[in-house]
Each structure stands twice: as structure tokens, then as C-alpha cells.
Image (cartoon, rainbow, N blue to C red):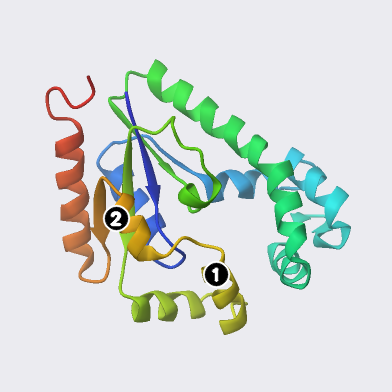
Amino acid sequence: MIVVGLTGSIGMGKSTALAAFAALGVPVWSADEAVHRLYAAGDAGARAVARLAPAAVGPDGVDRETLRAAILSDPLLLRRIEAAVHPLVAADRNAFLDRARAAGASVAVCEIPLLFETGPHDWIDRIVVVSAPADAQRARVLERPGMTAEAFEAMLARQVPDSEKRALADFVVDTGGSSDAARDRIADILTALTAPGEGD
């Protein structure tokens, strides 16, 4: 089975790209969705955050906006939370890959926003980077509820630049144009990944 790492900077259209792979019948996994599950009330991720930032955890689990504000005021907090939560996310991902292999999948896609930033990623066979022009990226992100220009810039500062990600990719999906063009590109990538000899 070929394991694909799908990544890209904030606001580039990773979730849309992941949905396009899923629509083609590919098993997909999202790190963000895994974190959402882990941050639910009583789950392991919520308990880990409660130990480090108790104000960010309520009866419904982790309040991500409160947590984001806490991280902006204490940059070291992010590293401590990542150290506690990343192993939980990795375990969730490995369970997904085990299920995909058991089901006989030829390709599985894992969406990991900070793939290059968190490394290593030697368990990945191919890397797909989702990219868009900087102005489109900024407009998309600032449309999100609770997002500010300050928070956006802080996130960008922690991420590997888009140009570097594109250079490291096996495939690039440009989401700056039409959605049909992006879906066609993903279909072409899947065809390439499933070509005879690709997974050998």
C-alpha cells in the first residue's frame, strides 16, 4: 500500500483535496479530525491539554479558540501541548493505516498540516502539497470565525514557506483556480500512484 502524506500551509485547501481523494474511493485520514476527536470531553487529548492549559478545557472538551489565545500569549505552551498530543494522534493514524492495509487498499492518504514542520515522515511513500496564491490563502483564512490577522501571521511564521513545500513535494495540487481543475489534478495523481510498478 502506498501511503500519501497530504500537506500544505494554512488556508491552501487541504480539506477539499482530501475530500476529492475520498470521493475517488481512497481511504483518507485527517490529523485535524483526529485532534478534534481527541479533544472531546473526557478523551485522552482533552486530559492532556487540561494538565497544561486548564482554562482551555470545559465540559465539552477543549475550547480551541481559548487554547489558541493561550498559545499566542505563551509560545512555549505550543511545544508542550504538541509533545503531549502528537503521540496520541500518531497512534490514531497508525490504527487507520492498519485498517486500510487489512482492507486491501492500494493507496491511503493522510492529511497532515504540519508534515514538514513536525517530521520525521519516513513512513510516507509520496508527498502531495496543496498550494494557492498568497492573496487567496490570506482571504480564505481571515474568513474563518475568530481568526485575526495577528493569529494568521503567527501561524505562518511557524510553518515552512509554501515555496519550500512545493519544492519537496512529489505532486502539487494548485487550488487557486477552479475546483474542477483541482479535482482533475487529484484524479491524475491517483492514476500515477496506482500505475504498474509504482508501489514496488
Crowding around mark 2 (Cα neighbors within 10 Å: few <14, some 14 to 19, many 20+) is few
For residue 173, what is the image quadrant? bottom left
Secondary structure under badge 1?
helix
- The residue lying at 68 percent from left, 48 percent from top is 82
Q: Residue at x 46, y 49 (%)?
A: 116
Q: As rendered, which of 7 and 54 lies closer to the eye?
A: 7
The mark tally for this picture is 2
Q: Earlier along the polypeptide chain: callout 2 or callout 1?
A: 1
Q: Few, some or many C-alpha atoms within 10 Å of disc 1 (few <14, some 14-19, many ≥20)?
A: few
29 w.r.t. 123: above or below = below
The three-letter amino acid code for the residue at tag 1 is: Ala
Residue 145 in sight here: no
Which amino acid is tagged 2? Ala
Examine the rendered structure and indicate whether residue 183 appears above or below residue 192. Answer: below
Q: Is residue 171 visible?
A: yes
Mark number, residue 157 = 1
Q: Which residue is mark 2?
A: 167
Residue 168: % across, % down: 32, 50
Position of residue 183 measured from the top left corner of the image (x, y, whole percent): 21, 55
Direction from residue 63 to residue 181 in the image, left or right:
left
The residue located at (15%, 22%) in the rendering is: 197
Q: Horizontally, is 186 left or right of 121 in the view? A: left
Image coordinates of residue 37 in percent, x first then y, are: 64, 44
Relative placement, left or right, of 29 versus 167 is right
Instruction: Tell me whether the residue at label 2 lies in contact with that at label 1, contact meaning CB atoms closer than 8 angstroms.
Output: no
Quadrant into which the N terminus falls: top left
